[in-house]
Amino acid sequence: DTGVSQDPRHKITKRGQNVTFRCDPISEHNRLYWYRQTLGQGPEFLTYFQNEAQLEKSRLLSDRFSAERPKGSFSTLEIQRTEQGDSAMYLCASSSGRISTDTQYFGPGTRLTVL
Amino acid sequence: GENVEQHPSTLSVQEGDSAVIKCTYSDSASNYFPWYKQELGKRPQLIIDIRSNVGEKKDQRIAVTLNKTAKHFSLHITETQPEDSAVYFCAASIWTGNQFYFGTGTSLTVIP
């Protein structure tokens, strides 16, 4: 499968714990995005990277959230001191970075449940 | 920022009928409008998109229309089939490489 992959697919944690998710974009895609989706809602933008540079962060991304893309390939999203309100599906997407064909392709998501 | 509204939230149609989902957006600078289909427990999949330099785009049974003056765009599915049942999301962005602003989704059910 050459699509966007995410790991893990499901994560159950207790409130106050830290969690880290990984996203592997489509090979050679320069742009990588993180979204959060709650039940019955559309995905909400969190942040995106152009190669290793984090270019934009949503106000939804509190200081408990941090994202990295150290080598411009895979990315990690860490949530510290998780809260029950963090329970959601975390989606990653990637795009080529070429304006003419810059469609975002989504991964399968990581479903986080905070108890 | 951009605000995208989507209607209806649920839609049931008989197999073979047409389905229409409408979205409005607020930022006149938005110029790229993709539509995604999301089946239960699966990732959003792009089904069609349109850029602001065209008013309509078709791909087999699926079409999207865009009215930039009124700031709304619509998804049209003809000859619906049970496998079209899913949640459909519209989105808007200022350019394709920017963040997407998604609508709240339409749950489409095609009744055999």
Image: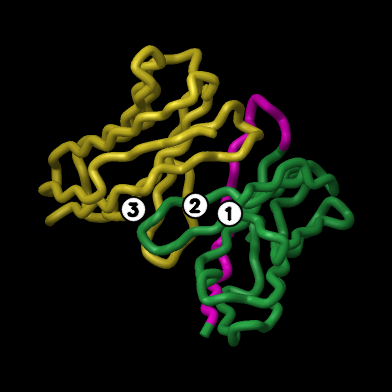
Chain colours: A green, B yellow
Residue assigned mark 3: B87
Residue A85 position in % (x across, y down): 51, 70
The region drawn magenta spans A97-114
Q: Please tell me which residue is depicted at 41% across the width and 29% down the height of the picture.
A: B25
Residue B71 position in % (x across, y down): 38, 21
Residue assigned mark 2: A43
Q: Earlier in the sequence, mark 1 or mark 2?
A: 1
Magenta span includes B46? no
Q: Quadrant of residue B40?
A: bottom left
Q: Please tell me which residue is depicted at 54% across the width and 34% down the height of the picture.
A: B1
Q: Secondary structure at mark 2?
A: loop
Asked whether B82 or A5 is in front, the reply is A5
Q: Secondary structure at mark 1?
A: strand
Q: Chain of mark 3?
A: B
**Residue type at numbered disc 1:** Tyr
Residue assigned mark 1: A35
Above or below, B106 against A68 in this view is above
Above or below, A67 against B80 in this view is below
**Residue type at numbered disc 2:** Pro
Q: Secondary structure at mark 3?
A: strand
Judged left or right of residue B46, residue B76 is left
Residue at mark 3 to residue at mark 1: CA–CA distance: 17 Å
Magenta span includes A110? yes
In the rendered image, the quadrant that contains the C terminus of chain B is bottom left
Q: Are the residues under marks 1 and 2 on the same chain?
A: yes
Q: Are the residues under marks 3 and 1 on the same chain?
A: no
How packed mark 1 is, by other alpha carbons closer than 10 Å (few <14, some 14-19, many 20 or more), is many
